[in-house]
Amino acid sequence: MNGRVAIPPAQLLRSRISRVCVAIAASSPEEMIQKAYEAARENPFLEFRLDYLAKPADVIPKIKKFLYELGEVTAIATCRRAPNGGKFKGSIHAEIEILSKAIEAGCDLIDIEIETAEEMKATELAKIRSLGAALIISYHDFKTTGNLDKVFDRIERFRPDYMKVVSTATCLADNVKMIRFLERTGDRANMIGICMGEQGLISRVLGVRAGSVFTFASASPGEETGPGQISARTLREIYRVDEVSPATRVYGVVGNPVTHSLSPLIHNLAFRRETVNAVFLALQATDMADLLTLVEAIPLHGLAVTMPFKSDILKHLANTDDLSGKIGACNTVVRALEGKLYGFNTDVAAIVRPLERRLPVRGARVLVIGAGGAARAAVFGLKDRGADVTIVNRTPEAAQKLARQAKAKAIKYEQLAKASFDVILNATPIGMRGHKQQSWLKPEQLNARLVFDMVYNPIETPLLRMAREKGLPVITGVEMFVQQGARQFEIWTGKPAPEEEMLRAVVHALRQRGATGEDEAGHSPVAGVMGPAKRLASAVAKPESAVAARPVKVVAKAAKAEPVKNAVVSQAPVKAAAERNGHGGTQVAAKAEKTIAKTTPVAKAKPVTSSQKTAEPTVKAKAVTTAKQPVKPVAKAKPVKAAANTVKKAVVATKPVKPAARAAKPAGRAVKQVKSSSKAKAKSGAKNAKAAPKGSQKRK
């Protein structure tokens, strides 16, 4: 006797199934059932890919026993034939016979591809439907995303219980096609819509809010049954697919490639930690037009921009901060309420802040290795802080050109052994995991008090290992990566970023990827990442003598000296966010509004009068700004152990609420400031203008 109840109608079945169906594929019946038991602990909705087995019929008795024991599991049986993208090499008759046995074993749904349905006789299709399982008729296009409406009409004539349309995304815009298709047809049928491929992630996460009944996932990484498929745990824990709704804001990291980016990990963690209804996706764009289509159609509320789009995106922005213009690159974009895009550069803050926590940047002699985009951010940011910057590059002409542009110095590689610096900063990919060159400098050229490597994978780069062997303090690329992400989070949300959690998540992920290990002395390189920052006491102190942790009060001053601008586009008042977050979000938001309200994308900021400072806290148009006067914290800071905790508390300690809240208005005001100031500039030629104000069910 089968312990399972009769198969319910399609609509009742729909009310019971979850948003994620886990595909179970294996090479043997025993392995398939073992994986099913493991997956069912967290996911009660499974698909048995019978076509992956050499003899699919051999697993049917085991499936029957499995479903009898786990009555709460809802199961789909699929035996897709090889001509239609599956692995089953038998005939249509053999496929239908296996699916019929799967129904008798207790499977709730069966998946038949449209090509098979079209070749079956009407009586054959009616016979298998009479067995009681819900029928899914599926279509798969492994090359492109074509006319989906024609596919719908092709399937609809069979009147299946569920219609599954799967295409391949060759660009980000194909996800828009799928989402619009689901929105049009979701009320007419029980739809399942997905785009395969690396660029189809958007449809896998957002399709469920557009009308797809559920989406598919793998049991674990490496067990994918379709191109671009991700694991169920990733869908649920990182992308929070069960919570995605029409009200969920969408952000993403755009670049090519971005498949292995850790940005979705840290930003989705931050959204969850700070209870922000948002999701962050990896967006692998083919070109700028493809990206802009997605930004407008989804819409996207913010972007983390990586190569090769950091420079190309500038001309599509309504405004940027000054440093983005000087550097010629923008890594953070925020979308205002009316749809315009504004740009910021948090790379500079991520470089300067870790240094400020360890030594005075003004007057510090810094050697920057490289002359590319990352090096430009470092050079201009450090020069803006008053550092004495020298540039070295494999191509001396590139170093000299950047030095002229930034009013810095250039040095030849051969001269490094005789030169000394306070900081050596690597702004090249040298040392990155998989990069063909792992080192460039020699030990005798590391004449510095501190070594900073912007490469974060691996955590312990050859350069940092060399520095440690010489007893030099180091700053890892992980710290910079988390810092730039934290500043982006604050720009988008107005809330202080949970830096410690973000840092731990990155370190854990890199450990899992095998990016860390033990050095020859048996020390884990991660220890230096998680520990408190060490303050280099003075210019004459030996590098290895800097062992005393910097007092929290001093750290707070450094953190406040570089407030991050927040594009005030949140629908919720910034003042409310400030009250929930120790006022830190208000200060960030107020300063960002003034940055957005500048009249030109690249322009020198007009000095702010003292009266303006009193009325509204104003920021110069820079990605990173040094406060000339220290700000008294709201509450007395307490010492903390983790470096990230220290910074986190420093961000929270800000100005009193009232002045900042007065400056932090909704994005509408910031946009009007742009418009009105632009008109004023056209009439009077003024550089700045005043802004106008505005307002399972378990079976029995």
Image: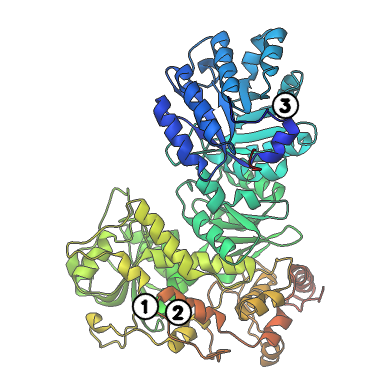
**What's under tag 3, amino acid-wise?**
Asp
Residue 24: percent from left, percent from top:
49, 32
Label 2 to label 3: alpha-carbon separation: 56 Å
Label 1 to label 2: alpha-carbon separation: 9 Å
Residue 448: percent from left, percent from top:
26, 75
Q: Earlier in the sequence, mark 1 or mark 3?
A: 3
Q: What colour scheme does the image use? A: rainbow
**What's under tag 1, amino acid-wise?**
Ala
Q: Do the residues under discs 1 and 3 have CB atoms within 8 angstroms?
A: no
Q: Do the residues under discs 1 and 2 have CB atoms within 8 angstroms?
A: yes
Q: Which mark is residue 533?
A: 1
**Residue at 65% from the left image edge and 30% from the top image edge:** 5
Seen as rendered, the residue at the extreme front is 1
Residue 32: percent from left, percent from top:
44, 30
Left or right side of 562 for 335: right
Q: Which residue is mark 2?
A: 646
Q: Residues within 10 Å of mark 1 (few under 14, many from 20)?
A: many
Q: Which residue is mark 3?
A: 161
Numbered disc total: 3
